[in-house]
Image (tube, helix red, strand yellow):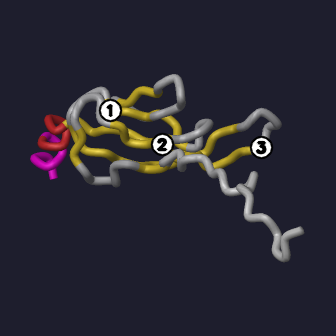
Amino acid sequence: MSTSKQGGSSRLGRDSAAQRLGIKVSAGEKVRIGMIIVRQRGTKYLLGKNVKMGSDNTIYAMKDGVVEFGSKSKKIFNGATRVAKIVSVIPAVEKAKVAKTK
């Protein structure tokens, strides 16, 4: 008989890798076509202009430009409203036109 407990392997201690979700590009930063802007599960952020959503709800740029975040009220399934966050890309050409008019 041993005087101490045998040291065996534990069944605990396994952990999964982080999913690395969230905003990848901040508002005002430049993006190129295909760059990922937001990685998300579900639709926490909705689509604006010049962006598309992948099959895993990743939002990515469809044109070169500058990222812009906004919000609007949206009606949900039970009739209540919620403030939805919207992601858009403003093309560099449009940005220059807006600057000239000011």
Residue, disc 3? 80
**Residue depicted at x 48% and y 48%:** 20
Tell me the crowding category of disc 3: few under 14, some 14 to 19, or many 20 or more residues within 10 angstroms, Cα based: few
Q: Are marks 1 and 2 in contact (CB under 8 Å)?
A: no
Q: Is residue 53 above or below residue 5?
A: above
User: Which sits in the foreground, 30 or 49?
Assistant: 30
**Residue depicted at x 54% and y 49%:** 18
Residue 26: x and y, percent?
34, 54
Secondary structure of residue under mark 1? strand
Which residues, given as a range, are shown in magenta? 97-102
Task: Indicate which disc, 3 or 1, sits on the residue closer to the N terminus.
Answer: 1
Quadrant of residue 78 within the rendered picture: top right
Q: What label sits on residue 86 in the rendered view?
A: 2
Is-magenta flag for residue 98?
A: yes
Residue 39: x and y, percent?
47, 41
Residue, disc 1? 61
Task: Indicate which disc, 1 or 2, sits on the residue closer to the N terminus.
Answer: 1
Residue 50: x and y, percent?
34, 29
Quadrant of residue 87 within the rendered picture: top left
Tell me the crowding category of disc 1: few under 14, some 14 to 19, or many 20 or more residues within 10 angstroms, Cα based: many
Q: Is residue 88 above or below residue 33?
A: below
